[in-house]
Image: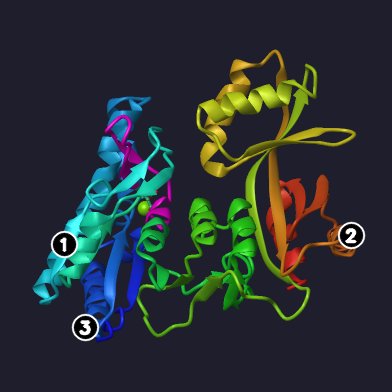
Protein backbone atom coordinates (compact mmCIF):
# COMPACT_ATOMS: atom_id res chain seq x y z
CA UNK A 1 0.00 0.00 0.00
CA UNK A 2 1.28 3.48 -0.81
CA UNK A 3 1.22 6.24 1.78
CA UNK A 4 -1.43 8.96 1.31
CA UNK A 5 0.06 12.14 -0.21
CA UNK A 6 1.53 14.58 2.32
CA UNK A 7 -0.89 17.48 2.92
CA UNK A 8 0.25 20.91 1.81
CA UNK A 9 1.81 22.97 4.60
CA UNK A 10 1.91 26.77 4.62
CA UNK A 11 3.48 29.05 7.20
CA UNK A 12 1.78 32.44 7.22
CA UNK A 13 3.13 35.42 9.08
CA UNK A 14 0.74 38.19 10.07
CA UNK A 15 2.38 41.56 10.67
CA UNK A 16 1.42 43.85 13.55
CA UNK A 17 -0.61 46.22 11.35
CA UNK A 18 -2.72 43.31 10.09
CA UNK A 19 -3.69 42.35 13.66
CA UNK A 20 -4.09 45.88 14.99
CA UNK A 21 -7.66 45.50 16.30
CA UNK A 22 -10.21 42.73 17.10
CA UNK A 23 -11.85 42.99 13.66
CA UNK A 24 -8.51 42.46 11.91
CA UNK A 25 -7.74 39.51 14.17
CA UNK A 26 -11.11 37.96 13.28
CA UNK A 27 -10.39 38.60 9.58
CA UNK A 28 -7.05 36.79 9.87
CA UNK A 29 -8.81 33.93 11.67
CA UNK A 30 -11.33 33.58 8.83
CA UNK A 31 -8.57 33.52 6.24
CA UNK A 32 -6.61 30.88 8.16
CA UNK A 33 -9.77 28.86 8.73
CA UNK A 34 -10.61 28.87 4.99
CA UNK A 35 -7.12 27.72 4.13
CA UNK A 36 -7.23 24.97 6.74
CA UNK A 37 -10.66 23.81 5.54
CA UNK A 38 -9.26 23.48 2.01
CA UNK A 39 -7.00 20.73 3.36
CA UNK A 40 -3.82 22.71 4.01
CA UNK A 41 -1.88 22.51 7.26
CA UNK A 42 -1.30 26.00 8.63
CA UNK A 43 1.18 27.53 11.05
CA UNK A 44 0.42 31.22 11.61
CA UNK A 45 3.22 33.30 13.06
CA UNK A 46 2.09 36.54 14.66
CA UNK A 47 3.58 39.91 15.46
CA UNK A 48 2.39 42.13 18.29
CA UNK A 49 -0.83 44.08 17.62
CA UNK A 50 -0.29 47.48 15.97
CA UNK A 51 2.10 49.68 17.92
CA UNK A 52 2.24 47.37 20.96
CA UNK A 53 6.00 46.78 20.84
CA UNK A 54 6.70 50.53 20.67
CA UNK A 55 4.29 51.14 23.53
CA UNK A 56 5.97 48.46 25.66
CA UNK A 57 9.38 50.02 25.00
CA UNK A 58 8.02 53.45 25.99
CA UNK A 59 6.52 51.96 29.13
CA UNK A 60 9.83 50.35 30.07
CA UNK A 61 11.64 53.66 29.59
CA UNK A 62 9.20 55.43 31.90
CA UNK A 63 10.23 53.06 34.64
CA UNK A 64 13.88 52.68 33.75
CA UNK A 65 15.83 54.89 31.29
CA UNK A 66 18.14 52.02 30.31
CA UNK A 67 16.08 48.90 30.93
CA UNK A 68 17.79 45.71 31.97
CA UNK A 69 17.85 43.70 28.74
CA UNK A 70 16.67 40.39 30.19
CA UNK A 71 13.66 42.12 31.69
CA UNK A 72 13.06 44.07 28.48
CA UNK A 73 12.82 40.76 26.63
CA UNK A 74 10.40 39.44 29.26
CA UNK A 75 8.28 42.52 28.66
CA UNK A 76 8.45 42.66 24.85
CA UNK A 77 7.51 39.02 24.32
CA UNK A 78 4.17 39.82 25.96
CA UNK A 79 3.14 41.66 22.76
CA UNK A 80 3.18 38.53 20.62
CA UNK A 81 1.53 36.48 23.38
CA UNK A 82 -1.45 38.81 23.26
CA UNK A 83 -1.88 38.36 19.48
CA UNK A 84 -1.32 34.61 19.51
CA UNK A 85 -3.90 33.89 22.20
CA UNK A 86 -6.54 36.21 20.69
CA UNK A 87 -6.08 34.74 17.21
CA UNK A 88 -6.30 31.24 18.60
CA UNK A 89 -9.54 32.09 20.48
CA UNK A 90 -11.04 33.52 17.27
CA UNK A 91 -10.09 30.39 15.33
CA UNK A 92 -11.53 28.03 17.91
CA UNK A 93 -14.79 30.05 17.80
CA UNK A 94 -14.92 29.44 14.03
CA UNK A 95 -14.77 25.71 14.72
CA UNK A 96 -11.15 25.51 13.63
CA UNK A 97 -9.12 23.77 16.29
CA UNK A 98 -6.04 25.88 17.09
CA UNK A 99 -3.30 26.10 19.69
CA UNK A 100 -1.04 29.02 20.43
CA UNK A 101 2.60 28.47 21.39
CA UNK A 102 5.30 30.87 22.57
CA UNK A 103 8.67 30.75 20.86
CA UNK A 104 10.15 28.65 23.62
CA UNK A 105 7.21 26.22 23.64
CA UNK A 106 7.62 25.85 19.88
CA UNK A 107 11.32 25.09 20.19
CA UNK A 108 12.78 28.28 18.69
CA UNK A 109 16.30 28.13 20.11
CA UNK A 110 18.51 31.21 20.02
CA UNK A 111 21.93 32.36 21.14
CA UNK A 112 22.08 34.02 24.54
CA UNK A 113 21.95 37.67 23.39
CA UNK A 114 19.06 39.67 24.71
CA UNK A 115 17.10 42.06 22.45
CA UNK A 116 18.99 40.99 19.32
CA UNK A 117 19.29 37.20 19.52
CA UNK A 118 19.85 34.93 16.52
CA UNK A 119 18.02 31.68 15.94
CA UNK A 120 20.49 28.81 16.16
CA UNK A 121 18.15 25.84 15.90
CA UNK A 122 14.50 24.81 15.84
CA UNK A 123 13.17 21.85 17.76
CA UNK A 124 9.53 22.17 16.78
CA UNK A 125 8.22 18.88 18.19
CA UNK A 126 5.13 20.42 19.76
CA UNK A 127 4.31 22.16 16.49
CA UNK A 128 4.53 18.89 14.56
CA UNK A 129 2.48 17.09 17.18
CA UNK A 130 -0.29 19.69 16.98
CA UNK A 131 -0.27 19.58 13.16
CA UNK A 132 -0.60 15.83 13.26
CA UNK A 133 -3.73 16.32 15.39
CA UNK A 134 -5.09 18.54 12.58
CA UNK A 135 -4.71 21.74 14.61
CA UNK A 136 -3.73 25.14 13.34
CA UNK A 137 -0.63 26.30 15.22
CA UNK A 138 -0.35 29.96 16.17
CA UNK A 139 3.24 30.81 16.94
CA UNK A 140 4.41 33.94 18.75
CA UNK A 141 6.99 35.53 16.48
CA UNK A 142 10.07 37.58 17.45
CA UNK A 143 11.05 35.34 20.38
CA UNK A 144 12.87 32.23 21.42
CA UNK A 145 14.80 30.74 24.29
CA UNK A 146 18.50 30.25 24.82
CA UNK A 147 19.31 26.62 25.65
CA UNK A 148 22.45 27.88 27.42
CA UNK A 149 21.00 30.51 29.75
CA UNK A 150 17.41 29.12 29.67
CA UNK A 151 16.29 32.72 29.24
CA UNK A 152 13.64 34.12 26.91
CA UNK A 153 15.15 36.22 24.12
CA UNK A 154 13.89 38.46 21.31
CA UNK A 155 15.20 38.61 17.75
CA UNK A 156 15.49 42.35 17.09
CA UNK A 157 12.83 44.68 15.72
CA UNK A 158 10.84 43.09 12.91
CA UNK A 159 12.16 39.67 13.90
CA UNK A 160 8.92 37.73 13.56
CA UNK A 161 9.60 37.36 9.82
CA UNK A 162 12.65 35.39 10.83
CA UNK A 163 10.61 33.22 13.23
CA UNK A 164 8.29 32.38 10.32
CA UNK A 165 11.10 31.46 7.94
CA UNK A 166 12.88 29.39 10.60
CA UNK A 167 9.71 27.40 11.29
CA UNK A 168 8.96 27.03 7.57
CA UNK A 169 12.50 25.70 7.04
CA UNK A 170 12.20 23.25 9.93
CA UNK A 171 8.81 21.94 8.76
CA UNK A 172 9.87 21.90 5.11
CA UNK A 173 6.77 23.99 4.36
CA UNK A 174 5.55 24.44 0.80
CA UNK A 175 5.94 28.16 1.29
CA UNK A 176 6.25 30.93 3.82
CA UNK A 177 3.80 33.79 3.29
CA UNK A 178 4.63 37.14 4.84
CA UNK A 179 1.27 38.91 5.02
CA UNK A 180 1.23 42.64 5.46
CA UNK A 181 -0.80 45.81 5.09
CA UNK A 182 0.84 46.37 1.69
CA UNK A 183 0.22 44.21 -1.36
CA UNK A 184 3.76 43.24 -2.31
CA UNK A 185 7.36 44.41 -2.69
CA UNK A 186 7.55 47.65 -4.69
CA UNK A 187 10.29 49.10 -6.89
CA UNK A 188 10.61 51.96 -4.36
CA UNK A 189 8.71 53.42 -1.44
CA UNK A 190 5.39 54.52 -3.07
CA UNK A 191 5.23 57.39 -0.55
CA UNK A 192 8.36 58.85 -2.17
CA UNK A 193 8.03 57.65 -5.76
CA UNK A 194 4.42 57.97 -6.93
CA UNK A 195 4.96 55.71 -9.95
CA UNK A 196 6.72 52.95 -8.01
CA UNK A 197 5.30 49.63 -9.17
CA UNK A 198 4.79 46.13 -7.83
CA UNK A 199 7.51 43.50 -8.27
CA UNK A 200 6.01 40.09 -9.04
CA UNK A 201 9.12 37.93 -8.75
CA UNK A 202 12.49 38.23 -7.10
CA UNK A 203 15.45 36.06 -6.36
CA UNK A 204 16.78 35.95 -2.77
CA UNK A 205 20.00 37.55 -4.03
CA UNK A 206 18.31 40.82 -4.87
CA UNK A 207 16.04 40.88 -1.83
CA UNK A 208 18.97 40.29 0.54
CA UNK A 209 20.73 43.36 -0.84
CA UNK A 210 17.51 45.38 -0.79
CA UNK A 211 16.80 44.60 2.87
CA UNK A 212 20.43 45.17 3.83
CA UNK A 213 20.22 48.61 2.27
CA UNK A 214 17.00 49.86 3.77
CA UNK A 215 14.03 47.95 2.33
CA UNK A 216 11.75 47.47 5.32
CA UNK A 217 9.44 44.99 3.67
CA UNK A 218 11.14 42.02 5.39
CA UNK A 219 13.56 41.49 8.27
CA UNK A 220 16.99 41.19 6.61
CA UNK A 221 17.90 38.03 8.53
CA UNK A 222 14.74 36.32 7.37
CA UNK A 223 15.71 36.58 3.71
CA UNK A 224 19.22 35.27 4.38
CA UNK A 225 17.70 32.36 6.26
CA UNK A 226 15.16 31.70 3.50
CA UNK A 227 18.00 31.46 1.02
CA UNK A 228 20.08 29.20 3.26
CA UNK A 229 17.15 26.85 3.89
CA UNK A 230 15.62 27.24 0.44
CA UNK A 231 12.28 28.42 1.84
CA UNK A 232 9.97 29.73 -0.88
CA UNK A 233 8.89 33.21 0.24
CA UNK A 234 5.78 35.14 -0.68
CA UNK A 235 5.04 38.73 0.37
CA UNK A 236 1.39 39.66 0.05
CA UNK A 237 -1.65 41.44 1.43
CA UNK A 238 -3.27 40.12 4.63
CA UNK A 239 -6.56 41.86 3.89
CA UNK A 240 -6.99 40.54 0.35
CA UNK A 241 -6.15 36.90 -0.32
CA UNK A 242 -6.80 37.40 -4.06
CA UNK A 243 -4.36 40.26 -4.70
CA UNK A 244 -1.05 39.37 -6.30
CA UNK A 245 2.03 39.59 -4.13
CA UNK A 246 5.74 39.00 -4.68
CA UNK A 247 7.20 35.53 -4.95
CA UNK A 248 10.85 35.09 -3.94
CA UNK A 249 12.72 31.94 -4.92
CA UNK A 250 16.26 30.82 -5.72
CA UNK A 251 15.63 29.96 -9.35
CA UNK A 252 13.92 33.12 -10.56
CA UNK A 253 15.87 34.89 -13.31
CA UNK A 254 14.99 38.24 -14.88
CA UNK A 255 14.84 38.23 -18.67
CA UNK A 256 17.39 41.01 -19.00
CA UNK A 257 19.95 43.18 -17.25
CA UNK A 258 17.80 45.82 -15.57
CA UNK A 259 17.43 47.98 -12.48
CA UNK A 260 14.88 46.39 -10.15
CA UNK A 261 14.47 48.52 -7.03
CA UNK A 262 15.70 51.65 -5.26
CA UNK A 263 16.06 51.71 -1.49
CA UNK A 264 17.57 54.05 1.05
CA UNK A 265 18.50 54.58 4.63
CA UNK A 266 19.87 57.49 6.57
CA UNK A 267 22.60 56.04 8.73
CA UNK A 268 25.87 57.05 7.13
CA UNK A 269 28.51 59.12 8.90
CA UNK A 270 31.67 60.71 7.60
CA UNK A 271 34.34 59.97 10.15
CA UNK A 272 37.80 61.31 10.82
CA UNK A 273 40.03 58.61 12.27
CA UNK A 274 42.94 59.86 14.37
CA UNK A 275 44.72 56.52 14.54
CA UNK A 276 46.16 53.83 12.32
CA UNK A 277 43.53 53.43 9.62
CA UNK A 278 44.46 49.79 9.00
CA UNK A 279 44.06 48.77 12.63
CA UNK A 280 41.66 51.09 14.47
CA UNK A 281 38.50 50.48 12.39
CA UNK A 282 38.91 46.70 12.74
CA UNK A 283 39.23 47.10 16.50
CA UNK A 284 36.21 49.34 16.55
CA UNK A 285 34.10 46.85 14.60
CA UNK A 286 35.09 43.98 16.83
CA UNK A 287 34.07 46.11 19.79
CA UNK A 288 30.70 46.69 18.16
CA UNK A 289 30.27 43.02 17.42
CA UNK A 290 30.75 42.26 21.07
CA UNK A 291 27.85 44.51 21.84
CA UNK A 292 26.08 42.58 19.10
CA UNK A 293 26.09 44.96 16.18
CA UNK A 294 26.23 42.86 13.07
CA UNK A 295 25.76 45.20 10.17
CA UNK A 296 28.34 47.95 10.42
CA UNK A 297 31.24 48.80 8.17
CA UNK A 298 33.83 51.45 7.37
CA UNK A 299 34.39 52.51 3.77
CA UNK A 300 37.69 54.21 3.06
CA UNK A 301 38.52 56.19 -0.03
CA UNK A 302 41.29 58.65 -0.92
CA UNK A 303 39.72 61.68 0.72
CA UNK A 304 37.44 60.38 3.39
CA UNK A 305 36.10 57.53 5.49
CA UNK A 306 32.45 56.73 5.87
CA UNK A 307 30.82 54.55 8.48
CA UNK A 308 27.55 52.78 7.70
CA UNK A 309 25.32 51.06 10.17
CA UNK A 310 21.92 49.41 10.13
CA UNK A 311 19.19 51.77 11.37
CA UNK A 312 18.35 49.78 14.47
CA UNK A 313 21.98 49.74 15.51
CA UNK A 314 22.82 53.41 15.06
CA UNK A 315 22.41 54.31 18.73
CA UNK A 316 24.93 51.66 19.83
CA UNK A 317 27.40 52.83 17.21
CA UNK A 318 27.08 56.47 18.25
CA UNK A 319 27.67 55.54 21.88
CA UNK A 320 30.77 53.60 20.87
CA UNK A 321 32.12 56.62 18.94
CA UNK A 322 31.45 58.83 21.93
CA UNK A 323 33.39 56.48 24.16
CA UNK A 324 36.37 56.71 21.76
CA UNK A 325 36.27 60.44 21.06
CA UNK A 326 40.04 60.72 21.01
CA UNK A 327 40.23 58.35 18.00
CA UNK A 328 37.07 59.11 16.03
CA UNK A 329 35.42 62.38 15.11
CA UNK A 330 32.08 62.51 13.32
CA UNK A 331 32.45 65.15 10.61
CA UNK A 332 29.09 64.79 8.91
CA UNK A 333 26.05 62.85 10.08
CA UNK A 334 23.24 63.88 7.76
CA UNK A 335 24.13 61.46 4.96
CA UNK A 336 21.75 59.00 3.31
CA UNK A 337 22.69 55.86 1.42
CA UNK A 338 20.69 55.15 -1.73
CA UNK A 339 21.00 51.81 -3.47
CA UNK A 340 19.81 50.64 -6.87
CA UNK A 341 19.58 46.86 -7.03
CA UNK A 342 19.83 45.16 -10.42
CA UNK A 343 18.72 41.85 -11.88
CA UNK A 344 22.35 40.82 -12.38
CA UNK A 345 25.78 41.89 -11.17
CA UNK A 346 26.27 45.61 -11.77
CA UNK A 347 28.99 47.01 -14.01
CA UNK A 348 30.86 50.28 -14.64
CA UNK A 349 28.43 51.33 -17.34
CA UNK A 350 25.50 51.10 -14.87
CA UNK A 351 27.46 53.22 -12.40
CA UNK A 352 28.42 55.86 -14.94
CA UNK A 353 24.87 56.12 -16.27
CA UNK A 354 23.49 56.63 -12.75
CA UNK A 355 26.20 59.15 -11.80
CA UNK A 356 25.39 61.12 -14.94
CA UNK A 357 21.69 61.18 -14.04
CA UNK A 358 22.42 62.46 -10.51
CA UNK A 359 24.62 65.21 -11.87
CA UNK A 360 21.97 66.24 -14.42
CA UNK A 361 19.49 66.51 -11.54
CA UNK A 362 22.02 68.62 -9.57
CA UNK A 363 22.33 66.03 -6.83
CA UNK A 364 25.66 66.05 -5.06
CA UNK A 365 27.09 62.56 -5.09
CA UNK A 366 29.33 62.30 -1.99
CA UNK A 367 30.50 58.79 -2.80
CA UNK A 368 29.40 56.02 -5.12
CA UNK A 369 30.39 52.43 -5.68
CA UNK A 370 29.20 49.26 -7.35
CA UNK A 371 29.02 46.08 -5.30
CA UNK A 372 27.51 42.74 -6.39
CA UNK A 373 23.94 43.45 -7.53
CA UNK A 374 23.70 47.04 -6.36
CA UNK A 375 24.97 50.53 -7.02
CA UNK A 376 25.36 52.69 -3.93
CA UNK A 377 25.31 56.46 -3.61
CA UNK A 378 25.80 58.67 -0.58
CA UNK A 379 23.96 61.98 -0.72
CA UNK A 380 22.95 64.57 1.87
CA UNK A 381 19.76 63.69 3.74
CA UNK A 382 18.21 66.80 2.20
CA UNK A 383 18.65 65.42 -1.33
CA UNK A 384 17.66 61.87 -0.45
CA UNK A 385 14.17 61.85 -1.98
CA UNK A 386 15.29 63.71 -5.11
CA UNK A 387 18.04 61.12 -5.59
CA UNK A 388 15.60 58.22 -5.12
CA UNK A 389 13.25 59.72 -7.74
CA UNK A 390 16.10 60.35 -10.19
CA UNK A 391 17.47 56.83 -9.86
CA UNK A 392 14.03 55.26 -10.08
CA UNK A 393 13.80 56.62 -13.64
CA UNK A 394 16.01 53.67 -14.69
CA UNK A 395 13.33 51.18 -13.64
N1 LIG B 1 6.63 43.11 17.31
C1 LIG B 1 8.02 43.15 16.99
C2 LIG B 1 8.42 44.51 16.46
O1 LIG B 1 7.56 45.36 16.31
C3 LIG B 1 8.43 42.07 16.05
C4 LIG B 1 7.85 42.17 14.68
O2 LIG B 1 6.97 42.99 14.43
O3 LIG B 1 8.27 41.41 13.81
O4 LIG B 1 9.55 44.73 16.19
MG1 LIG C 1 5.72 44.53 15.37
The first of marks 3 and 2 along the sequence is 3
The residue under label 1 is 99
Q: Nearer the viewer, residue 70 or 22?
A: 70
Residue 159 in view (yes/no): yes
Q: Which residue is at 37% across, 81% downward?
A: 241
Q: Nearer the viewer, residue 169 or 85?
A: 169
* Up-down relation of residue 219 to residue 97 (above or below): above
Q: Which residues are magenta?
A: 143-163
| Residue 146 falls within the magenta-colored stretch | yes
Mark 3 secondary-structure assignment: helix
The first of marks 2 and 1 along the sequence is 1
The residue under label 3 is 37
CA distance for labels 1 and 3: 16 Å
Residue 292 in percent (x, y) is at: 50, 32
Q: Which residue is at 59% across, 69% downward?
A: 250
- Locate the N terminus by quadrant: bottom left
Residue lying farthest to the front in this orientation? 1
Amino acid sequence: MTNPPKPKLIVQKYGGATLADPEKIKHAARRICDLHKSGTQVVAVVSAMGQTTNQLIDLAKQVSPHPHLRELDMLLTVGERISMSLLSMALNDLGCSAISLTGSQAGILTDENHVNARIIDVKGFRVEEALTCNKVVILAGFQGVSPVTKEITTLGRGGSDTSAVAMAGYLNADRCEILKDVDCVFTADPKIVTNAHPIKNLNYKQLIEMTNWGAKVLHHQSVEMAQAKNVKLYVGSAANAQSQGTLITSDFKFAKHQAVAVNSFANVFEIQINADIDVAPKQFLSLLNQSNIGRAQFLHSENNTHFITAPEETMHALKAFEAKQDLYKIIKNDIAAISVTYSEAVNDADLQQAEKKLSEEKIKNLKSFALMYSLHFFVTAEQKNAAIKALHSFI
